[in-house]
Structure formats: structure tokens, C-alpha cells
Image (cartoon, rainbow, N blue to C red):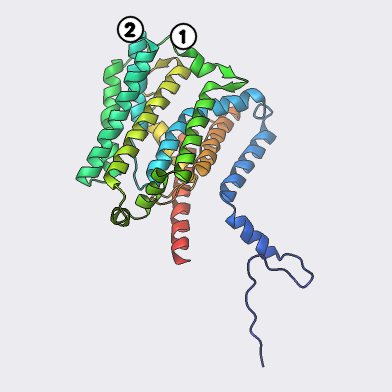
Amino acid sequence: MSVKTLPDAPGATDPHGRRRPGSRLGALRRTPHAGLTAVLAVVVVATVLRTDAFATDTNVINILRQVSVTAVIAAGLTLLMTAGGMDFSMGSNVSVTTALGAQLLSHGRSTVLTVAVTIVLATVIGLVNGLVVTFTNVAPFVVTLATATLLDGVALLVLDSVSVSIGTRMFPLGNDKFLGIPYLLLLAVLVLVATALVMRFTVFGRDAYAIGGNEHVARLSGIDVTARKLTLYALTGALSGLAGLMLLSRLGSSSPGTGGLSLQLTAVAAVVIGGTSLAGGHGTVAGTVLGVVLLGVVANALNLLQVSSNYQPVSVGGVLLVAAVANEFHKTRSARN
């Protein structure tokens, strides 16, 4: 009589009490963001082997300062996409914020007034997106892409198609450090930590996951979906305004093309690479952070290796495509299981 053997269970051991190789592989697959971490490690090691300038303290600080603006946008986008939303106008919102802030400061307005006006304007832009998406049922992608095009034009009108300098106004925020850590990085970390805590420990965060998982079921369970969506879009607008002020303080001026689609695509790529579902219902700030850092490291490596800057958008687009395909495969496999 033949005896049918059962497949090894995860964590199974051999007759000598040693863990089977398959169990180690299964544990690795279950480790959050293991693949993304491995890719980041490979890129870092490869770059270190090619150039000594990469691993210096100055360069590492420079990378972290540069990705801080993207990280703030990506934080808001992570929360919004987890709830099933999308905002392709955040980069263009940054363009308007930097343009308006530069004009106000260059005309002698106080820094406090400039910060207040730009943040309020950016929040209103996000809220308008939310109102249109919520009450017209037009796809968020379509609404926010149209808004992005409109805002790019508004930014050019505000600047009158010329660069506007703010001199040394807001210089400390963009260039000074606290205990060796740039203020921009500290601000980005605060935003990321706050977003992670909201998603993990608050009713608002749990509601976002529920809405992204199934909006109809979320309504039936008593969640005020309309209010939550409006709040989410207003929040992404406010974070866009904050990111715009951070970028203005780092650059010291606003020019046509500051922010815009390139910044937006980088943020979207970072969020998708980090594992946030395009369909909603799943997302983590930790994954987004890894995605932001990976794209920042790749861009820096290309510069240090003297690769043409034209390859940077190619790399971002390629990584985004691969991440989107992998995201879809993962969703399909999870549904089967």
C-alpha cells in the first residue's frame, strides 16, 4: 500500500531537526518589502563600487535633503491611494505654491503671511479636486490630470514666464541643519511618521483602508465616505503646499517648470514601488519611504557616474512600469489564495 506524503509546511524541519530550505524562502517572501530592500541594497553596493563619492556623509545628506520634498507629497498620496483615490495634480499644486510664494516674498510680504496664504490656497485646490471627484463620480485620474494642466498654466501666469528670486528669505529652512540633520529632512520625517500613525492607529486611517477596499460596504458600515474623501483630498492639497514651500526654500527661487509633472510622477512611482495598491485598500508608509529613497539613490548614482540626465526620467518611468505590473500580479495572486 502506497503512502501519500503531505507537502512540507512552512517552517518544517528535516529528521535531524534542521529547517528545510523551503521554509527559509517562504519566510523571506513573507518579510515586508524584502524585494524592494534587496533592490535598494544592490543599487547602493553597485554605486559604492563604481565611485567613492557616493558613500560620503555630504552626499548622503544631499540625497536625503533632495528627496524630502518628494517624501512629503508621497506621504499624502499613500493615504489617498489607500482609500482608492488619486491626485495627479499635487506636483502642479507645488508649482503654483512656489510661484505664489516667490512673488509674495519678492514683493516684501512677510514670511508668515506667505506661508499662510500658500498653504490655504493649496488646501482649497485639493478640496476642489475632492468635491469634483465626490459629487460628479468622474474618475479621479481624469479630474486631477485636468486640474494639473490648469495649474501648470496658472503657475506660468503668476511668474509671467520668468524666474523669481526670494534672496535669502526662508534660507534657513532649506539649507540649515539641526544636529547635522537638514531641517527639510526633519520636516519630511515628521510628516511621514504622522501619516504612518494615522494609518495605523486612528479611526480615520482604518476608514481609509475600508473605503479603498470596498466603498459601498464602507457606506453600509456607517462610515461617512463623502466627508472622509473630502478630508483626504484637502490633506493632499495642504501637503502639496508644504512641499512647495520646502522646495522654494531649498532653491531660493521659482522658475517655470519647478515642480509639475516630473515631481508628480516621481512621487507616484515611489508610492507604487512601495506596494500601495493602485486599486486601494492596501498601503504602507514604510514601503513609500523605501520607494522614495530608491528613486533618490538611482538619480544620485546617475549623476555621480556622469550618465546623461536624460536617462533619469527613463529610469523613473521604467521602474514605475515594472512596479505597476508587479503590483497587479501580487493582487491577482492574493485573490487566488
Q: Nearer the viewer, residue 6 or 150?
A: 6
Q: Is residue 217 left or right of residue 166?
A: left
Q: Nearer the viewer, residue 74 or 202?
A: 202
Q: Is residue 59 left or right of residue 319?
A: right
Under circle 2, the secondary element is loop
Q: Farthest residue in the bottom direction? A: 1
Which residue is rendered at x = 66% and y = 90% of the image? 2
Residue 336 placement: quadrant: bottom left
Residue 96 spot, x, y in % from top left: 32, 23
Give the Cα separation between the discs numbered 1 and 2: 14 Å
Residue 7 spot, x, y in % from top left: 62, 74
Q: Is residue 124 left or right of residue 72?
A: left
Q: Nearer the viewer, residue 251 or 241?
A: 241
The residue carrying pointer 1 sits among few (fewer than 14), some (14 to 19) or many (20 or more) residues within 10 Å by Cα, namely: few
* Identity, as a three-letter code, of the amino acid under mark 2: His
Which residue is rendered at x = 30% and y = 33% of the image? 126
In the drawing, what numbered circle is on residue 107?
A: 2
Residue 18 placement: quadrant: bottom right
Under circle 1, the secondary element is loop
Which residue is rendered at x = 47% and y = 32% of the image? 191
* Identity, as a three-letter code, of the amino acid under mark 1: Thr
According to the picture, the residue beneath numbered tag 1 turns out to be 168
